[in-house]
Amino acid sequence: MSDEEISKLQAYLCKKVNPAITLRRRGKKDDSLEAWIGDEFFALVFKDDEDPKDVSYNLDMAILAMDLDEALNA
């Protein structure tokens, strides 16, 4: 992904989800990014550009059952 795409995605996610989100490149993978809040990784962002006229981005977040229990007890 280009630097411009990353900046736009980060601004969008900060506005819609959490202002502390940062996006980081994934080494040599150029079709996805890591999403972080502070020092905690929480999701991947994938680019879907199979149809160049209809580009979209997917936020993929796995939630472990033990994390749900911790959230209730916090």
Image: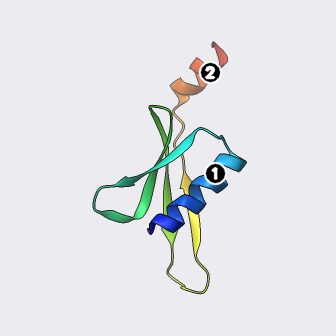
Residue 53 spot, x, y in % from top left: 60, 87
Q: Residue 56, located in which quarter of the rendered image?
A: bottom right
Q: Position of residue 32 (x, y in %)?
A: 43, 61
Q: Which residue is mark 2?
A: 71
At label 2, counting other C-alpha atoms closer than 10 Å, the crowd grade (few under 14, some 14-19, many 20 or more) is few
Q: Secondary structure at mark 2?
A: helix
Q: Secondary structure at mark 1?
A: helix
Can you say whether 38 is above or below 36 in the image?
A: above
The image's colour scheme reads rainbow
Q: Tell me the kind of residue under disc 1.
A: Leu
Name the quarter where the N terminus is drawn.
Answer: bottom left
Q: For mark 1, does the 10 Å Cα neighbourhood hold few (<14), some (14 to 19), or many (20 or more) residues?
A: some
- Return the residue nearer the eye: 61 or 66: 61
Which disc is residue 74 wearing? none
Residue at x-position 44% and y-position 31%? 39
Choose between 34 and 22: the one closer to the eye.
22
Question: Which amino acid is tagged 2?
Answer: Ala
Q: Position of residue 23 (x, y in %)?
A: 48, 50
N-terminal-most mark, 2 or 1: 1
The residue located at (68%, 44%) in the rendering is 17
> Quadrant of the image for the C terminus?
top right
Q: Which residue is mark 1?
A: 13
Q: Quadrant of residue 8?
A: bottom right
Cα gap from disc 2 to disc 1, whole angstroms: 22 Å
Q: Is residue 68 left or right of residue 45?
A: right
